[in-house]
Amino acid sequence: MTSKIDLVRSAIWAEELTDDVIERAARGISERHYVKDSYICHRGDRLDAWTGVVTGLVKMSAVALSGKALTFAGIGAGGWLGEGSMLKNEERKYDLVALRDTHLLLMNRATFSWLCENSVGFNRFLVRQLNERLGQFIAVTEHDRSFDAKARVARNLSWICNPVLCPQVRGVIEITQEEVGHLAGISRQVANRCLKELADEGLIALEPGLIRPLAVDRLASYGA
């Protein structure tokens, strides 16, 4: 079993941090496990922790006033989320659901604030993370209004391969057809059809419980 300090050292935001800063950060981080389909937090909750995915898959979503379910992002291994709510000290604007058994790291607010105030390297990472997330959410708005099911599947797969947002995925996505459907807002049957068509087009390779993206750039721009 990997120790907590080793998990922290391997985090993408720790790459520019010194050992003493990493050790200081580790003292403010706890671990938590969630079973499949459980809520990590509900919209309106105050989750006073910056959240990292060690293993598993987390869906960031909400239900609009019209009743329409909206999925903002899927966060895979190595991804961290919630920095906006931490920086603004506000309640969450979305639900977080574990789509499969999930292991999380939770950094408390005091530690997050200390890093923001004392670590140039940590702040450089936050700028990159926020820039990537902004681009993702702009694309979500675009494809939700304009693109068909297959394009939504393609783009969700590309986001899970983002080296900043999900750095430990590394080109192999552990995901089921049902989970793809949850992220893209479509049924499992439609997800299955879309994945087979993307595989026929040479963009992905399908294996039991795994998807290997073969052309991430083309997935990211699919349907444009």
Image (cartoon, rainbow, N blue to C red):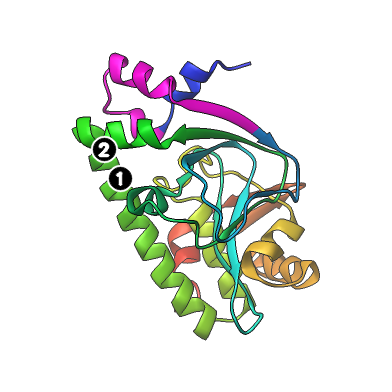
Label placed on residue 116? 2
What residue is disc 1 on? 126
Label placed on residue 182? none
Q: Residue at x 46, y 65 (%)?
A: 220
Label 2–label 1 contact, CB within 8 A: yes
**Circle 1 crowding by C-alpha within 10 Å: few under 14, some 14–19, many from 20:** some
Task: Pick the residue in front: 55 or 171.
Answer: 55
Query: In the rendered image, which quarter is residue 9 located in?
Result: top left
Query: Position of 32 compared to 11: left or right?
Result: right
Where 194 sits versus 104, above or below?
below
**Circle 2 crowding by C-alpha within 10 Å: few under 14, some 14–19, many from 20:** some
Q: Nearer the viewer, mark 2 or mark 1?
A: 2
Residue 111 position, x and y percent, is: 36, 30
Q: Which residues are magenta?
A: 12-32
Query: In the rendered image, which quarter is residue 59 located in?
Result: bottom right
Residue 105 position, x and y percent, is: 53, 32
Q: Residue at x 45, y 49 (%)?
A: 82
Q: Residue at x 72, y 40 (%)?
A: 101
Residue 112 position, x and y percent, is: 36, 36
Residue type at tag 2? Cys
Residue type at tag 1? Leu
Q: Is residue 155 magenta?
A: no
Mark 2 and mark 1: Cα distance apart in space: 9 Å
Camera sees residue 201: no
Query: In the rendered image, which quarter is residue 96 located in?
Result: bottom right
Q: Is residue 23 magenta?
A: yes
Camera sees residue 176: yes
Query: Position of 78 compared to 183: left or right?
Result: left
Q: Quadrant of the C terminus?
A: bottom left
